Image: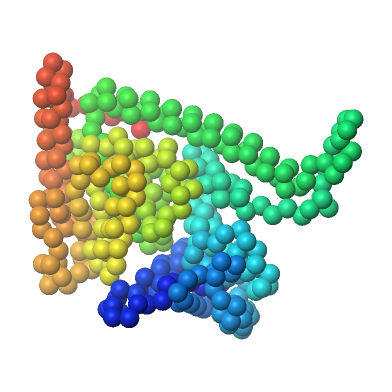
């Protein structure tokens, strides 16, 4: 694979880090490509005042990419930017190679990782929603003749036929996902009736959420350094102390410029976040771009109207930090430093969760003073 990115030209007078987004995004694209099983053979970044509307990158850069890709024996070129249908077609014709964009790569990773029926439905819906506006017809060559009187013209074109089939499949997928949403709603209602509180893990992909989930619940959910290793949501019980338990939910990780198709298709899964009494925002404290990753997560949470939800900031992977950098981590009441791998800080995290949950329960009792007291020992719901 040869990777290509476009970024706006650096403005004079700004510090070097201010224009480094293109390089950082290409590094992340390389990680995504390796997660999909591809070997990255070369990288090209073009900076220009504005993207070319026909091919994203300029004609001269296309020739450069073509020469590099052929010299590397690359079979595919992956662009870090989302390509319009016209750009995709023009680039494939100019390069003579298969061309993918960032969204297609992420969709491919999700399709490989989906294990549950729910996840497969959501991934297929995202793929078809992405494909529908990118279908290219072939004129009347593949058109079908209509049947009946007055239908002996060119008939239904192949493009129209393909669109109709995709729209029909999208309707079926949405019906299937709606059933999933109904089942999840029943589970959530059962938890409410049993007075169970749910805590949800959120964060950038590869921040260590699944490792932390396993450490807190003693589960054996797959954890991997690959991006998007966890796709299907998982819920397990966590004992906070001798008297209290909560349900911990592990969801799909976020990423910068997460495709809208994925956010829409995975709404049934992300609804678990809307019902959570507490969000644990997990950050890889050792990552050099942790600030921009946190900003991406905050932007997605804002888009889901979750910015007001109670939250704890979990600085994970502190075992990878020198002691001097550990001391510089935020140390407010809502900041907890842990290492999911070594177990350091997990006791403080359980205590912090218990404190927030107690406040939530007290607020709920005050709002519903006539409701019966909350039981401290509960049977596990069907999750």
Residue at 33 percent of width and 57 percent of height: 296
Residue 345 visible here: yes
Q: Quadrant of residue 125?
A: top right
Looking at the image, is 220 positioned above or below residue 357? below
Looking at the image, is 58 positioned above or below residue 243? below
Along the line of sight, the residue nearer the viewer: 102 or 373 = 102
- Please state the horizontal and vertical placement of residue 334, each as a whole percent of the image: 14, 50
Location of the N terminus (image quadrant): bottom right
Q: How is the image coloured?
A: rainbow
Location of the C terminus (image quadrant): top left
Horizontal arrangement in the rendering, residue 193 relative to residue 176 (left or right): left
- Please state the horizontal and vertical placement of residue 276, each as a whole percent of the image: 27, 37
Q: How many marks?
A: 0
Q: Quadrant of residue 101?
A: bottom right
- Please state the horizontal and vertical placement of residue 211, each as a whole percent of the image: 30, 54
- Please state the horizontal and vertical placement of residue 357, each as a whole percent of the image: 16, 37
Residue at 42 percent of width and 54 percent of height: 258
Residue at 59 percent of width and 34 percent of height: 172
Residue 34 visible here: no
Residue at 37 percent of width and 77 percent of height: 10
Horizontal arrangement in the rendering, residue 153 relative to residue 39 (left or right): right
Horizontal arrangement in the rendering, residue 371 relative to residue 259 (left or right): left
Looking at the image, is 206 positioned above or below residue 302? below
Horizontal arrangement in the rendering, residue 95 relative to residue 279 (left or right): right
């Amino acid at each position: 694979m040869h990777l290509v990115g476009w970024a706006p030209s650096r403005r004079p007078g700004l510090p070097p880090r201010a224009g480094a987004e293109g390089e950082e995004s290409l590094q992340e694209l390389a990680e995504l490509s390796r997660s999909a099983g591809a070997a990255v053979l070369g990288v090209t970044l073009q900076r220009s005042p504005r993207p070319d509307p026909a091919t994203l990158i300029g004609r001269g850069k296309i020739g450069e990419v073509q020469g590099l890709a052929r010299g590397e024996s690359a079979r595919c070129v992956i662009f870090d930017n989302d390509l319009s249908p016209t750009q995709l077609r023009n680039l494939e014709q100019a390069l003579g190679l298969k061309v993918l964009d960032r969204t297609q790569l992420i969709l491919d990773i999700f399709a490989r990782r989906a294990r549950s029926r729910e996840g497969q439905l959501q991934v297929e819906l995202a793929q078809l929603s992405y494909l529908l506006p990118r279908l290219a017809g072939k004129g009347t060559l593949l058109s079908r003749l209509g049947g009946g009187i007055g239908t002996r013209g060119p008939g239904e074109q192949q493009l129209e036929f393909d669109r109709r089939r995709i729209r029909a499949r999208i309707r079926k997928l949405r019906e299937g996902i709606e059933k999933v949403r109904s089942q999840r709603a029943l589970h959530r209602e059962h938890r409410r009736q049993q007075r169970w509180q749910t805590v949800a893990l959120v964060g950038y992909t590869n921040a260590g959420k699944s490792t932390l989930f396993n450490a807190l619940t003693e589960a054996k959910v797959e954890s991997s350094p690959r991006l998007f290793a966890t796709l299907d949501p998982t819920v397990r019980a966590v004992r906070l102390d001798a008297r209290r338990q909560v349900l911990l939910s592990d969801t799909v990780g976020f990423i910068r410029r997460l495709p809208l198709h994925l956010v829409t298709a995975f709404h049934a899964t992300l609804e678990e976040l809307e019902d959570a009494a507490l969000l644990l925002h997990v950050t890889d404290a050792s990552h050099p771009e942790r600030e921009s990753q946190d900003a991406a997560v905050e932007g997605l949470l804002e888009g889901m109207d979750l910015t007001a939800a109670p939250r704890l900031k979990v600085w994970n992977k502190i075992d990878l930090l020198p002691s001097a950098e550990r001391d510089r981590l935020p140390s407010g009441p809502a900041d907890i430093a842990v290492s999911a791998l070594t177990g350091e800080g997990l006791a403080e995290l359980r205590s912090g969760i218990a404190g927030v949950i107690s406040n939530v329960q007290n607020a709920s009792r005050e709002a519903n003073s006539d409701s019966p007291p909350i039981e401290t020992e509960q049977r596990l719901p069907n999750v």
